[in-house]
């Protein structure tokens, strides 16, 4: 982009933010009932615009912002729903109850595998690969180190980073 295009884009975004951010925050606060969550969704909505290379042709800015914010809220709801289902699956698998059918246990394990894959997609390549080798393939540190051609201490760092990330995603706000 030429510097004049960048300047024009920045002016447009600044004006859009200045004219509509307060209104969007108010709408999100009413919808979500939480000012902090509303602030996060509002920020993500405008971040989507920042991530675009070109200035989109927006004739109705509020409608555009509402659609973007609604999509973000739907995505957040789906993530929370998956997290809740995961916690239930973990509780099911950890329960010492032999009354669960093989189909129920298999379904819970499949859900956990899907969640693990989703969480691993948020990780950098090395941490993701180490996590999948450990949790899916059942490899130990030494095997993972040999496969990835790194030291065992590097494997421990990758797995630690991955597990901290997964814990933070599954248990937000926990120490």
Image (cartoon, rainbow, N blue to C red):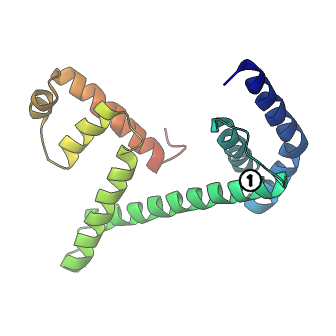
Frontmost residue, 175 versus 34? 34
Instruction: Give the answer, above or below, for where 15 lies relative to 138.
Output: above
What residue is drawn where x is 73% and y is 39%?
55
Residue 114: x, y in percent? 33, 59
Tag count in the figure? 1
Q: From where the camera sits, is residue 100 visible?
A: no
Frontmost residue, 115 versus 85? 115
Q: In this view, does 99 lie to the left or right of 17?
A: left
Instruction: Give the answer, above or below, for where 11 lies relative to 20.
Output: above
Element carrying mark 1:
loop
Q: In this view, does 154 lie to the left or right of 122?
A: left
| Residue position for label 1 | 34
Residue 46: x, y in percent? 72, 41
Q: Quadrant of residue 14?
A: top right
What residue is drawn where x is 50% and y is 57%?
79
Q: Is residue 18 left or right of residue 58?
A: right
Q: Which residue lies furthest to the right in this view?
A: 19
Q: From where the camera sits, is residue 57 visible?
A: yes
């Amino acid at each position: 982009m030429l510097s004049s295009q960048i300047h024009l884009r920045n002016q447009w975004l600044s004006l859009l933010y200045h004219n509509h951010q307060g209104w969007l925050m108010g709408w999100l606060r009413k919808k979500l009932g939480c000012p902090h969550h509303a602030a996060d969704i509002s920020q993500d909505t405008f971040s989507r615009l920042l991530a675009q290379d070109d200035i989109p042709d927006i004739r109705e800015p509020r409608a555009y912002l509402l659609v973007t914010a609604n999509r973000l809220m739907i995505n957040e709801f789906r993530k929370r729903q998956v997290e809740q289902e995961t916690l239930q699956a973990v509780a099911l698998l950890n329960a010492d109850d032999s009354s669960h059918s093989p189909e129920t246990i298999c379904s819970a394990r499949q859900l956990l595998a899907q969640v693990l894959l989703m969480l691993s997609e948020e990780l950098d390549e090395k941490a993701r690969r180490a996590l999948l080798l450990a949790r899916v393939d059942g490899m130990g540190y030494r095997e993972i180190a040999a496969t990835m051609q790194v030291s065992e201490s590097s494997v421990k760092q990758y797995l630690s980073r991955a597990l901290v990330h997964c814990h933070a995603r599954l248990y937000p706000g926990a120490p």
